[in-house]
Image: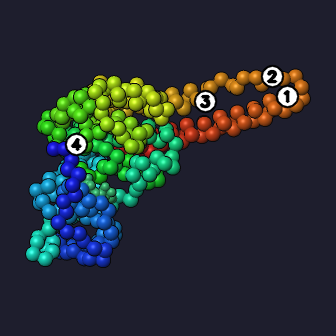
């Protein structure tokens, strides 16, 4: 099913309203709306143990299906991939019984907000984190499906990409349940809509393309060639070209393979910059020339120090990522 963009919501809860679960009797006080989509609306609310995200819907089957996916996520190798599930219940609103579930509130920024304040290298680091989680999900027999920036948040520090909206998660081998054209390899003529790891890896590459082209773009005749061109023409993406193109063309067998390639590119990027040749034309005989030379040298040392610092920071981040696995 292509994602329905019409926001068919039956009712809205207002700030300050309280809902009480019919079965578990837990009470939640609505703080504000976080967002809404085809299956329901998500609210920030306060519960007995602090802030939570409450998703209400009108279609109980869709809500149950999301709850089932969240339950599966919580069992994936003991690592929480999506927001953790806290409560599932119904509440009565007028004549209606409304299904809802309560999950961990992920306090974070969208990928676009985050990238505005951070260096382009961060896109690569977030991709590495995403691929690490995808590897676990795939190993557990699931494919994320509707992978796109809207379904990701960056929490922290330490900064970490987390998934939200697990509605599109599909068991390996089935047909992708939900997709968004720009991130769908079927739309670009680069593969089927069968749920397999390579489906998510295509979308992971497209997330990077979307970060470089926030306005997105329409497909032309040769979708594959067009994406290749888009990667080559972007200074943000071209260092990752080999990895992104392999992801787009379905050349990776696993998220782990793509992740390892991405880590190598990030490492090489750090070291090759540090070993860059010194600037030309520094040799002068005069004393003023010597001063210029000294200044340049000082600047070069500072530059190298900053680069070395950034490189060590990236290595430290990888260490944090591996610790959180
Ligand atoms: N656990 C959470 N923590 C913080 N914010 C959340 C959480 N879950 C959802 N949100 C916010 O609520 C918005 C709507 O979430 P929802 O899951 O309904 O996504 P959607 O794609 O808009 O909906 P649908 O799957 O129903 O089409 C998200 O874009 C996100 O900003």
State if disc 1 and disc 2 touch (CB < 8 Å): yes
Q: Where does label 4 land, which residue?
A: 179
State if disc 2 and disc 4 touch (CB < 8 Å): no
Vertical arrangement, residue 105 with respect to residue 318, above or below: below
Q: Where does label 3 land, which residue?
A: 274
Q: Earlier in the sequence, mark 2 or mark 1?
A: 2
Viewer-nearest of discs 2 and 3: 2
**Separation (CA) of disc 2 from disc 1:** 8 Å
Number of other residues with Cα within 10 Å of mark 3, as a class: few under 14, some 14 to 19, many 20 or more: some
Residue 310's spot in the image, x, y percent? 57, 40
Residue drawn at 70 percent across, 34 percent down: 301
With 46 as the anchor, is 196 left or right in this view? left
Residue 111's spot in the image, x, y percent? 40, 48
Q: Where does label 1 land, which residue?
A: 289
Residue 218's spot in the image, x, y percent? 31, 37
Residue drawn at 30 percent across, 30 percent down: 220
Query: Element type at marker 2?
Result: loop
Q: Which sits in the foreground, 114 or 273? A: 114
Q: Earlier in the sequence, mark 4 or mark 3?
A: 4
Q: Which image quadrant for residue 135? A: top left
Quarter holding the C terminus is: top left
**Separation (CA) of disc 2 from disc 3:** 22 Å
Q: Where does label 2 land, which residue?
A: 283
Residue drawn at 52 percent across, 42 percent down: 119
With 197 as the anchor, is 309 left or right in this view? right
Q: Earlier in the sequence, mark 1 or mark 3?
A: 3
Query: Element type at marker 4?
Result: loop
Vertical arrangement, residue 18 with respect to residue 102, above or below: below
Viewer-nearest of discs 4 and 3: 4
């Amino acid at each position: 099913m292509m994602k329905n963009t019409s926001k068919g919501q039956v009712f809205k809860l207002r700030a300050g309203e309280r809902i009480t679960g019919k079965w578990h009797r837990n009470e939640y006080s609505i703080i504000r709306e976080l967002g809404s989509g085809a299956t329901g609306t998500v609210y920030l609310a306060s519960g007995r143990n602090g802030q939570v995200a409450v998703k209400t819907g009108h279609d109980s089957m869709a809500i149950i299906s999301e709850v089932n996916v969240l339950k599966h996520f919580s069992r994936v190798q003991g690592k929480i991939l999506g927001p953790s599930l806290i409560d599932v219940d119904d509440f009565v609103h007028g004549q209606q019984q409304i299904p809802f579930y309560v999950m961990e509130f992920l306090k974070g920024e969208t990928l676009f907000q985050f990238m505005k304040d951070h260096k382009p290298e961060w896109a690569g680091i977030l991709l590495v984190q995403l691929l690490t989680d995808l590897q676990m999900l795939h190993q557990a027999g699931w494919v994320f499906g509707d992978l796109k920036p809207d379904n990701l948040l960056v929490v922290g520090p330490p900064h970490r990409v987390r998934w939200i909206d697990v509605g599109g998660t599909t068991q390996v081998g089935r047909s992708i349940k939900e997709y968004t054209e720009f991130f769908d390899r079927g739309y670009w003529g680069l593969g089927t809509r069968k749920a397999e790891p390579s489906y998510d890896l295509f979308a992971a590459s497209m997330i990077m393309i979307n970060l470089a082209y926030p306005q997105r773009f329409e497909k032309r005749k040769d979708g594959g060639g067009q994406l290749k061109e888009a990667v080559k023409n972007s200074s943000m993406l071209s260092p990752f070209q080999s990895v992104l193109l392999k992801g787009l063309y379905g050349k990776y067998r696993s998220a782990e393979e793509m992740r390892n390639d991405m880590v190598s590119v990030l490492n090489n990027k750090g070291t090759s910059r540090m070993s860059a040749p010194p600037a030309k034309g520094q040799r002068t005989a005069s004393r003023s020339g010597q001063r210029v030379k000294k200044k340049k040298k000082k600047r070069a040392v500072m530059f190298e120090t900053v680069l070395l610092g950034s490189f060590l920071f990236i290595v430290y981040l990888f260490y944090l990522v591996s610790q959180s696995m």
